[in-house]
Image (spheres, helix red, strand yellow):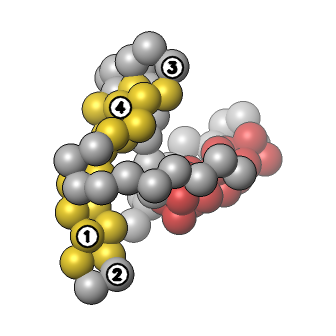
Amino acid sequence: MLVFVREIGESLVIGDDIVIKLVDVKRGVVRLGVDAPRHVDVHRSEIYRRIQAHRGEEEGAPADCTQKRVLR
């Protein structure tokens, strides 16, 4: 794992078109801003895991299954 030290207002650049900016730090909570192209999905890890689990359920579902679950 690569670890960076950043101050408020400083950024990281990933590739040519993704920028992650440290917006704020208060009482141990870090706020990040992500600027990425629309075709790049950006999710919190817990949401990403739900999406992956939901996709796995869809792949295992019968072909005639028309009901979809809503992620909460």
For badge 4, the amino acid type reads Val
**Lateral position of residue 67 relative to residue 56, left or right:** left
Q: Nearer the viewer, residue 37 or 50?
A: 37
User: Which mark identifies residue 19?
Assistant: 4
Secondary structure of the residue carrying numbered label 3: loop
Return the disc, 1 or 4, that comes first in the chain's sequence: 4
Per the model, the C-alpha gap separating discs 2 and 4 is 22 Å
Pick the residue in front: 59 or 46.
Answer: 46
Residue at (44%, 49%) from the top-left corner? 43
Residue 32 appears at what percent x and percent y? 31, 54
The crowd level at tag 2 (other Cα within 10 Å; few <14, some 14-19, many 20+) is few
> What is the spatial separation of the Cα atoms under label 2 and label 1, in whole angstroms?
7 Å
Residue at screen point 21% across, 47% down: 9
Residue type for callout 3: Gly
Task: Mark 1: give few (<14), some (14-19) or many (20+) Cα within 10 Å.
Answer: few
- Return the mark for residue 25: 1
Does 19 appear above or below 51?
A: above
Sequence-wise first label, 2 or 3: 3
Picture quarter containing residue 72? bottom left
Q: Which residue is mark 2?
A: 28
Q: Label 1 vs label 4: CA separation?
A: 18 Å
Q: Is residue 10 visible?
A: yes
Badge 2 vs badge 4, beta-carbon distance below 8 Å: no
Measured from the top left, where is residue 52 in percent x and y? 64, 50
Residue type, mark 1 in image:
Val
Asked if disc 3 and disc 1 are in contact, CB closer than 8 Å, the reply is no
Q: Residue furthest bottom?
A: 27
Distance between mark 3 and mark 4 Cα atoms: 9 Å
Which badge, 2 or 4, comes first in the chain's sequence? Answer: 4
Q: Are marks 3 and 4 in contact (CB under 8 Å)?
A: no
Which sits earlier in the primary sequence, circle 3 or circle 1? 3
Q: CA distance from mark 3 to mark 1?
A: 25 Å
